[in-house]
Image (spheres, rainbow, N blue to C red):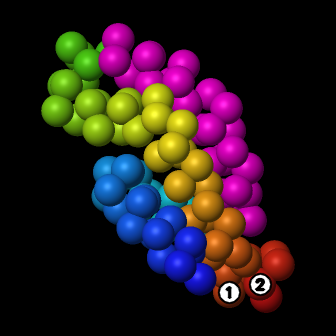
């Protein structure tokens, strides 16, 4: 149980709140069942996506890109995000959580 609380504190410190909110909303919606797959994909491709965001930063704005790009490039932050999704499990309204 202490590890669970530590993981939740770690997610708050490691990931920008906008990314956590986006994942929580995705998991709570009708696509909740595929959230684990999407976050797993971000774990695998996160570094590359982060690098693409850094290249787009002059067009998008560095302040909008920096927190998410840094998180995508950080293995520990992505592991914490994945752990959060797995901990929440199936939600009501999803195929598994009917």
Up the image or down, 15 lies above or below 32; here it is above
What percent of the width, then of the height, locates residue 66?
Answer: 27, 31
Q: Is residue 34 left or right of residue 5?
A: right
- Up/down of 75 relative to 19, above or below: above
Q: Are marks 2 and 1 in contact (CB under 8 Å)?
A: yes
Residue 38 shown left or right of residue 63 in the figure:
right
Measure the C-alpha gap from mark 2 to mark 1: 5 Å
Of the pair 94 and 83, the residue shown nearer to us: 83
Local SS, label 1: loop
**Disc 2 packing (10 Å; few <14; some 14–19; many ≥20):** few
Residue at 51% in and 44% down: 76
Residue 64 at x, y percent in the picture:
23, 35
Point out residue 41 in the picture as x, y percentages from the top left corner.
Answer: 68, 38
Secondary element at image label 2: loop
**Residue under numbered circle 2:** 97
**Quarter of image, res 91:** bottom right
Q: Quadrant of the C terminus?
A: bottom right
The magenta-colored residue range is 28-55
Quarter occupied by the N terminus: bottom right
Q: Residue most toward the front? A: 2
Toward the right, the furthest residue is: 96
Q: Is residue 39 magenta?
A: yes
Is residue 10 in the magenta section? no
Residue at coordinates 77% horizontally, 84% vertically from top-left?
A: 97
Circle on res. 92: 1
Q: Position of residue 23 (x, y in %)?
A: 51, 59
To which quarter of the image does residue 31 belong? Answer: bottom right
Q: Residue at x 32, y 51 (%)?
A: 16
Q: Residue at x 61, y 61 (%)?
A: 83
């Amino acid at each position: 149980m202490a590890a669970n609380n530590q993981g939740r504190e770690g997610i708050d410190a490691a990931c920008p709140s906008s990314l956590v909110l986006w994942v929580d909303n995705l998991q709570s919606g009708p696509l909740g069942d595929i959230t684990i797959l999407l976050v797993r994909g971000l774990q695998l491709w996160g570094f590359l996506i982060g690098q693409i965001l850094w290249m787009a930063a002059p067009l998008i704005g560095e302040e909008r890109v920096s927190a998410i790009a840094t998180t995508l490039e950080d293995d520990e932050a992505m592991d914490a995000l994945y752990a959060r999704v797995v901990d929440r499990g199936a939600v009501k309204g999803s195929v598994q959580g009917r």
